[in-house]
């Protein structure tokens, strides 16, 4: 068993252990590390192989999981069993993605209660965290094969605009894949590091990072000073990228071939061939002026000029985003010292030309735009490993800090390795009708069940005015000052009642104990995450049972035919599933009860609205 030694003051690991950098992308993912001999960051690939792993997962009927290039063909042949763009779902609930639900060809479950969407394949429910962990596992496996050593620690990148929930979900995916995620860093920061920016504490710079990937575009304005990157602004379009270039070219070819949309929806393999051909054409035109090929025994051609005309409106949109980002950062184009190009689609010459013209400056585009984020993550990993002494390391929290939530789960508010000083706020609510007190227990540690962690303190928030469960809004803030003192504040927003407490989290905890807690968390990661998933499914199911019961008490008279009997049966089945502690069964029965009650709930709601409208002039 590997021994982890961690220096509390710096958070750096003491042992020469390999730490990898991972770019977990919407379209493609990569893993990189520092070469032990050359000390250069390199992406990990088999001899002459490809480093890029498409972020695609295919579930075959036998329950096998295929990740990467091999999964790609199934996007068209078996779309309902093939997951792509899972990064768009990380840390999101159904409400967040509902407007774009048709974008996904696989089944996303619409259940109002859940805090995270679920994807259903056969009878198994997967969370975006589960799915992302499958991609990370594949990367880990490849890295271990190439490096011929176990890989257990990683730095993972996320877009600068990711919120707390999305960052936490990324961290959990890493943990589930068996990785100790030492830090989550912003993609534009990683790209800057790969260009050697930010390795000296004296450097002061304003950097624009333009990232055009497969399906998303974002631009970030960063400020570097005293060795710290600060995100001044971000802008972008989460549904704009190289895939859109491909569709424009595909439609262009489709017109040349005189194929109708109908022909394509009937012939899936033709659609696939056309799509792949369009991407080939696009890539070819990056280095050539003309593309020609044959499909269904007919010739297709496209010139660079034609291609540029097609995509110009899309690039114009990205320029508008750059403008807005500058405005939000309260800066002028002339303030930008460095423009870094990231993402496969920035290879397109017209993209480079238009971005450079807009900023009126030469671009930093010498590092491979597919690899630049992963390389930067590897450089950050090396710093954390304590190998790169030139870089200043800020004080960080040695263990995660959080509170206990329903089902004895640990809800992390400030993750381990967060910079000090640091602060974070989250909102919680009551679980019981008329609840007037709320006990907030503060824990430190990496385990998912609070009793495995270290209890630091408890706050008893009293005087919450009685209201139905779920109505109270309790804001919990964690503030760690520069001396590492944690202050926890709890405030009920509707009434304003407030309470706070000061804690020294480091008190009575030494390196050895931190080390022991970290090891335990790694050894129990899989079990812990399974327990958390079960507890969450159970909490959600119990909530649904409660609301259904309350609904029936009020509205039983308005139910017709077998609705009452069906509901009772579904409720009983759900109760039974809960007692059997089977996550997938609980989720299946939750969905079943939802499906039975949704139609009449809607009907009765409409009825009520109708009643309220009666006698009123509209
Ligand atoms: P993400 O960050 O979204 O995972 P990437 O940065 O890997 O995505 O970018 C993938 C996109 O880059 C795809 O649309 C791909 O077609 C495009 N791409 C890759 N190579 C080239 C090239 N030579 N010319 C034009 N586009 C390219
Ligand atoms: Mg990317």
Image (tube, helix red, strand yellow):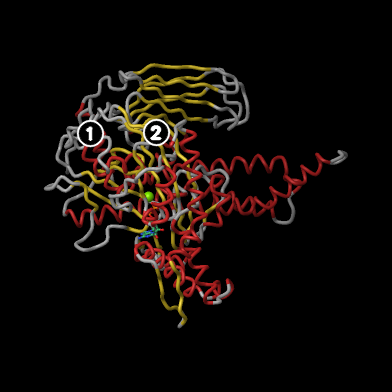
Q: Please identify the quarter of the rendering in which residue 15 is found.
A: top left
Q: Quadrant location of the C terminus?
A: top right
The residue beneath circle 2 is 335
Q: Tell me where residue 104 appears, x and y as whole percent.
A: 51, 57
Specify the label residue 58 is tagged with. Answer: none
Q: Quadrant location of the N terminus?
A: top left
Q: Tell me where residue 160 appears, x and y as whole percent.
A: 41, 39
Q: Tell me where residue 90 appears, x and y as whole percent.
A: 44, 46
**Label 1 CA crowd tier, 10 Å (few <14, some 14–19, many 20+):** few
Apparent side of residue 423 relative to residue 149 in the rendered image (left or right): right
Q: Residue at x 20, y 27 (%)?
A: 511
Question: Front-most of 394 and 567?
Answer: 394
Question: Front-most of 128 and 423?
Answer: 423
Q: Tell me where residue 281 appears, x and y as whole percent.
A: 41, 67
Q: Please identify the quarter of the rendering in which residue 469 is found.
A: top right
The residue beneath circle 1 is 516
């Amino acid at each position: 068993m590997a021994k982890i030694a961690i220096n509390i003051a710096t958070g750096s690991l003491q042992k020469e252990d390999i730490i990898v950098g991972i770019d977990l992308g919407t379209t493609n993912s990569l893993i990189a590390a520092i070469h032990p001999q050359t000390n250069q960051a390199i992406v990990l690939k088999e001899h002459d192989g490809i480093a890029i792993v498409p972020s695609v997962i295919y579930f075959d009927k036998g329950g096998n999981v295929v990740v990467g290039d091999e999964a790609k063909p199934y996007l068209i042949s078996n779309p309902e069993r093939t997951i792509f763009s899972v990064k768009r779902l990380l840390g999101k609930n159904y409400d967040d993605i509902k407007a774009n639900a048709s974008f996904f060809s696989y089944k996303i479950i619409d259940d109002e209660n859940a805090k995270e969407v679920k994807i259903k394949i056969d009878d198994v429910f997967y969370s975006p965290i589960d799915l992302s962990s499958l991609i990370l596992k594949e990367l880990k496996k490849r890295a271990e094969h190439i490096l011929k050593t176990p890989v257990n620690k990683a730095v993972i990148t996320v877009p600068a605009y990711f919120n707390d929930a999305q960052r936490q979900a990324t961290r959990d995916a890493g943990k589930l894949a068996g990785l100790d995620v030492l830090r989550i860093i912003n993609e534009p920061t990683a790209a800057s590091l790969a260009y050697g920016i930010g390795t000296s504490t004296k450097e002061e710079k304003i950097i624009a990072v333009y990232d055009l990937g497969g399906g998303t575009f974002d631009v970030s304005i960063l400020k570097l000073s005293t060795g710290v990157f600060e995100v001044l602004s971000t802008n972008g379009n989460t549904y704009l990228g190289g895939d859109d270039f491909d569709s424009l070219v595909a439609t262009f070819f489709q017109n040349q071939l005189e194929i109708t949309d109908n022909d394509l929806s009937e012939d899936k393999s033709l659609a696939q061939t056309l799509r792949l051909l369009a991407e080939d054409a696009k890539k070819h035109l990056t280095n050539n002026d003309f593309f020609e090929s044959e499909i269904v025994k007919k010739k297709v051609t496209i010139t660079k000029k034609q291609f540029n005309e097609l995509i110009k409106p899309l690039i114009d949109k990205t320029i508008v985003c750059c403008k807005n980002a500058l405005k939000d950062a309260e800066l002028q184009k002339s303030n930008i010292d460095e423009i870094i190009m990231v993402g496969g689609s920035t290879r397109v010459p017209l993209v480079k030309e238009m971005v450079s013209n807009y900023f009126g400056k030469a671009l930093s585009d010498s590092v491979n735009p597919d690899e630049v984020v992963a390389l930067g993550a590897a450089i950050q990993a090396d710093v954390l490993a304590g190998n790169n002494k030139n870089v200043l390391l800020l004080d960080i929290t040695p263990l995660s800090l959080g509170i206990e939530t329903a089902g004895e789960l640990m809800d992390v508010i400030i993750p381990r390795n967060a910079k000090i000083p640091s602060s974070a706020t989250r909102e919680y609510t009551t679980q019981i009708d008329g609840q007037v007190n709320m006990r907030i227990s503060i824990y430190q540690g990496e385990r998912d069940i609070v009793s495995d962690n270290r209890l630091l303190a408890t706050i008893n928030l009293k005087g919450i005015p009685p209201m139905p469960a779920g109505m109270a809004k309790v804001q919990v803030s964690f503030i760690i000052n520069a001396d590492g003192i944690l202050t926890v504040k709890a405030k009920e927003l509707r009434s304003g009642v407030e309470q706070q407490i000061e804690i020294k989290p480091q008190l009575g905890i030494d390196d050895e104990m931190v080390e022991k807690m970290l090891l335990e968390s790694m050894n129990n990661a899989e079990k812990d995450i399974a327990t958390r998933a079960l507890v969450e499914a159970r909490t959600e199911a119990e909530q649904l049972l409660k609301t259904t019961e309350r609904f029936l008490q009020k509205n039983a008279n308005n139910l017709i035919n077998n609705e009452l009997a069906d509901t009772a049966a579904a409720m009983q089945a759900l109760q039974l599933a809960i007692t059997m502690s089977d996550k997938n069964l609980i989720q299946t029965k939750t969905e079943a009860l939802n499906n039975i009650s949704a139609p009449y709930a809607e009907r009765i709601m409409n009825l009520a609205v109708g009643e309220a409208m009666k006698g009123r002039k509209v």
